[in-house]
Amino acid sequence: MITKIAWKNIWFKPLNTALSIILLTASVAIITLLILLEEQFEKKFSDNIDGIDIVLGAQGSPLQLILSSVYQVDAPTGNIDYTEAKKWMKHPFVESAIPLAFGDNYRGFRIVGTTPEYLTKYGAALKEGKVFVNNFDVVLGSAIAQKMNMKVGDKFFGSHGDAAEGEVHDHQAYTVTGIATPTGKVVDNLILCNIQSVWAMHDHEHEEGAEAEDQDHDHEAAADAHDHEDHDHNHAEKAHDHEHEENAVISEEGKEITAVLVKFRSKMGIVTWPRILAQNTKMQAASPAIEINRLFALFGIGLDALRYLAIGIMIISGISIFIALYNTLKERKYEFALLRVNGASRLQLLSLVLIESLLLCVTGFIFGTIVGRVALLFISGSSEDEFKMSFNPFQFVWEKEGYLFLLTIFVGILAAVIPAVKAYSLNISKTLANA
Amino acid sequence: MIQTKNIHFSYGKGTDFSFPNIAAVSGETLLITGGSGKGKTTLLHLLGGLQRPKSGEVLIENTNIAALSEKKLDHFRGKNIGLILQQSYFVASLNVLENVVLASWLASGKQAVEKAKQLLAELDLKEQLHKLPSQLSIGQQQRVSIARALINEPKLLLADEPTSSLDDENAFKVADMLSHLAKQYGTALVIVTHDQRLKDRFSNQISLS
């Protein structure tokens, strides 16, 4: 009954109530969004570096190397010599080493030359078909198969480089031989083939002049988005050569790859390799864990700023509830006196004021939780388009959202304390006598 | 049945009141009159348990309410005392019926909806059940507060200047209605007033001086 009165009371002043609820909703929505983003973002990032201690790649920005070869979001730093890389892949420290060669994409999805080990590393099995064996056999990530509505046996042409608008390699089609199970990791959005395929696809364009190869390394295994423009001429001239290279084993001599994902047997390597490689080779060794921490530290500033903003709004909403309750107290003191006359106890009045505030807070919290998730849904949509990274708005981070709920309740109690105590200690005789 | 024994009250700063002993039995009406500043409202508040006397006893059905704890007093007041104030106050967000039902819930923990409807119908408020109190006229509001005061069938009904804002015709109507209801519900009725019209109407009077 007290709750019913409280409920009727808050809707008796719809504008005050709306203001308080909107402010609470805004702050709870921002914080919920942050909690979910942080949780899922970090999980996505750390899931993908599980079992990768070091990434070998061309010199350049280590962060770029990690982003391109682990998360598949940035352009590669360049290529490394396969023979050279192999020496390190066979190093006694190394437990496993997975080579990656980038070259093409299909409608924006990267085609990555690698070994079947890559699938196992990310915990992907084959839902249908079999793994790539021959050149130009590909395994599709589950998300691609779904979005593109492709199945085993389909053929398609890749485009050169990173961009979907790149030059189409129309002399040789890829054949889908398998579709991977969903993993929630990068592999869902990749098209995988063997490394030979990548070489074969691009070799093709270079056979006219072996001497050009020295300057033109990039074209071969992995081509950056920026270099494919000056590359067109080769292709046009030589497209008629070599119709099929399936199963033709290409010599590894002088070939290049983009990166190697290394897992160490001895963790010593994590510390020593970056220095050794920098001194002795043209390659670099970057630690995904370190680079991602650096990235998060950068993000962290922005996230912190948002968090302070949200807490600021929450304080303002607390003040708004306080002012609303306090202001109406003057006109409501007769109402309170009357309730006392009718037999209400002091505690019932105290709880009436508290419940009014808490109802506002709980309503605000519920709306905020919903609005935050709707916002995440939109963000997920755009990040899916841009980074092939989606978020699940229906996840509940019970612990952190529980704290947020407690914080909201705390704000509600704090805002109501003074008005509630005033209602509690109201002198009914004086109130009614001075009427 | 209400009676007082030697009640004395002080606001401090030299405003002291010593009230004559009063008594009213069930169904009877007692008028307390006196000019401004003679402590009429104070006495009413003492009788209603809104104030505690400095000394003396207020006995309602043989319970000395001056000695009850705060919480017990709240409960006793809700159950046994009906109060009609000079100005009518309501929980503004609740409608007429809910306001009356609320009084029954506060006193007994039960919502006497049917009884409230019947009582309001008796007071000619049948059409107003679902209106907000602020939408009613002053006279209607007063009748709602009478209904509210009677919903728990109290032992004592206190009215503070119930006719001060009414014209002659309505003043007599209200006076008749109050004494009639007091008889019907077996309630001792105490009216505090300086209204000459009521002094002419009720013979059982005590004047404060």
Image (cartoon, rainbow, N blue to C red):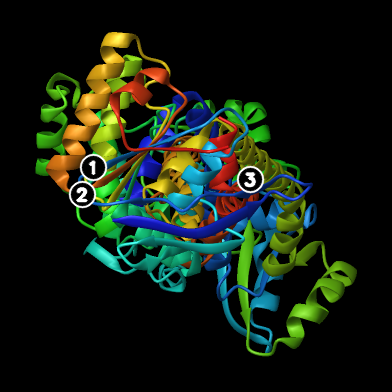
Question: Is A334 or A363 nearer to us in this picture?
Answer: A334
Q: Is B200 above or below relative to A73?
A: above
Residue A83 to residue A187: above or below: below
Please say whether residue A184 is visible from this viewpoint: no
Asked if residue A188 can be seen in this view, the reply is: yes
* Same chain assignment for discs 2 and 3: no
State the image coordinates of residue A289 (x, y, percent, origin top left). 69, 68
Q: Quadrant of the N terminus of chain B?
A: bottom left
Quarter occupied by the C terminus of chain B: top right
**Secondary structure at numbered mark 1:** helix
Q: Determine whether, in the image, residue A141 is placed left or right of residue A305.
A: left
Residue drawn at (36%, 61%), measured in percent from left and top?
B76
Residue pointed to by mark 3? A74
Foreground residue, B167 or A263? B167
Label drawn at residue A292 = none
Please, which chain is the residue tagged with disc 2 on?
A: B
According to the image, label 2 marks what residue? Answer: B153
Instruction: Look at mark 1 in the image and give the residue it sits on.
Output: B150
Name the residue: 66% across, 59% down. Answer: A254
- Left or right, B128 with respect to A223, comes to left
Q: Quadrant of residue B142?
A: top left
Read off the chain for label 3: A
Going 64% across and 77% down the picture, which residue do you hit? A89
Q: Quick one: SS at disc 2?
A: loop
Q: Amino acid at mark 1?
A: Leu
Q: Are marks 2 and 1 in contact (CB under 8 Å)?
A: yes
Residue B116 point in image, percent of width and height: 16, 39
